[in-house]
Image: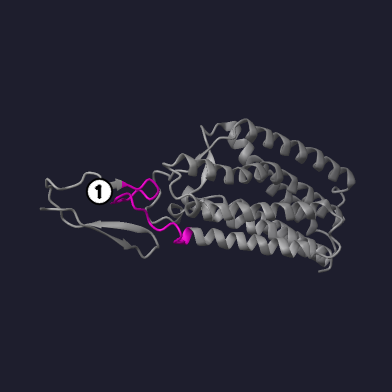
Amino acid sequence: TNMAQQRRTKEKDGGWVVVDSPQLSGSNADPTDAATDATDGATIANTESPPSFVLRKGQVVFIFYALCHVLVLLLNLTINGGSSYVGTTLVSAVAAALVWDNGIIAAGRVLCPRAADDDAQLRFLSALSQPRFILHAFLTPLLAVETAQLGFRAGIGWCGPFAVSVTWVVSGGVAILGLAHHLQHPKLAIKTAHPKQPKSAWSGHLLTMTTAGPKTAGTLLMMIGPAVTLCIFTIVVGVSMQYTSSPSVNRAGSWLTWTSVFELLSNGGPPWTMQFTGNCGEVVFLLGFVVAERTLAGG
């Protein structure tokens, strides 16, 4: 009797593959012995998948990002003299939301390893992922309020009470529009790999959700526009702060400027790296707000 023999080996990059030995067809061969793992795309015996509790490098990166946002949140909560500013509270809210965001990205494959072919796991992962999109749509534009308040505290002439009020109105309106847009199109789907994604890419270690349906111009505008506008606005305020006579205001402005530039640049590159660099940019961007706050507060 000729039977197919398979064994599993662990790659150096933390992924799992199956190495097939030479095999001949035979009457005792079981056609159900080989099945395609929908998560990893590898052919394995008896549909057995890699242990879901094994963390891979891509997942570890996002755990690290989540811990970084915990640190940013704790630093922000300890700012002296900043508690009376709504912008400081918004930074804390965004940091807490990004702890969840990065945590779910890291845990998706562990919690729902069969989401691709198990409706119950797909619904569960979708429910866990919904806050990621809701909070992103609503909170991101509101960070402009923190930028305006920092400019006001720094004594920038054009960033007075009226400018802060206008920022509240505009960013609040964009936040409501973004939230409404997502609630109109709430369906999520498993994020698939880009056709040109290398097999060794760490993004292949992740199981995450994305918005379902075609990415229309309106959808892309609502998803990307507020973040890009926020970065540009923060750069303008940061540069303005560097033209004052106060050394502490200059330092705060430098932090706002360069962390905003980093956030913009981090969202460039191929899709299989952008998720990693973009989320790193979010850590640095929020840290810039916290350092600027602490600098202006004399911390």
In front here: 6 or 136?
A: 6
Task: Please say whether residue 190 is one of the residues in the magenta stretch.
Answer: no
* Figure disc tally: 1
Secondary structure beneath dot 1 equals loop
Q: Position of residue 237 (x, y in %)?
A: 77, 52
262 lies above or below 225: below
Q: Residue furthest bottom?
A: 299
Left or right, 222 with reference to 124: right
In front here: 145 or 28?
A: 28
Q: Position of residue 61 (x, y in %)?
A: 52, 61
Q: Position of residue 217 (x, y in %)?
A: 57, 32
Dot 1: within a 10 Å radius of its alpha carbon, few (fewer than 14), some, or many (20 or more) residues?
some
* Residue identifier under label 1: 33
Amino acid at circle 1:
Asp
User: Most prominent secondary structure in the magenta stretch?
Assistant: loop
Q: Residue furthest right?
A: 161
Task: Please say whether residue 51 is one of the residues in the magenta stretch.
Answer: yes
Q: How is the image coloured?
A: one colour
Q: Position of residue 261 (x, y in %)?
A: 65, 54
What residue appears at the point 76 percent right and 65 percent down from the top-left corner?
251
Left or right, 270 with reference to 82: left
Left or right, 192 with reference to 185: left
Residue range of the region highlighted in magenta in the rendering: 36-58
Q: Residue furthest left?
A: 1
Question: Quadrant location of the C terminus?
Answer: bottom right
What residue appears at the point 29 percent right and 56 percent down from the top-left corner?
18
What residue appears at the point 46 percent right and 50 percent down from the top-left corner?
272
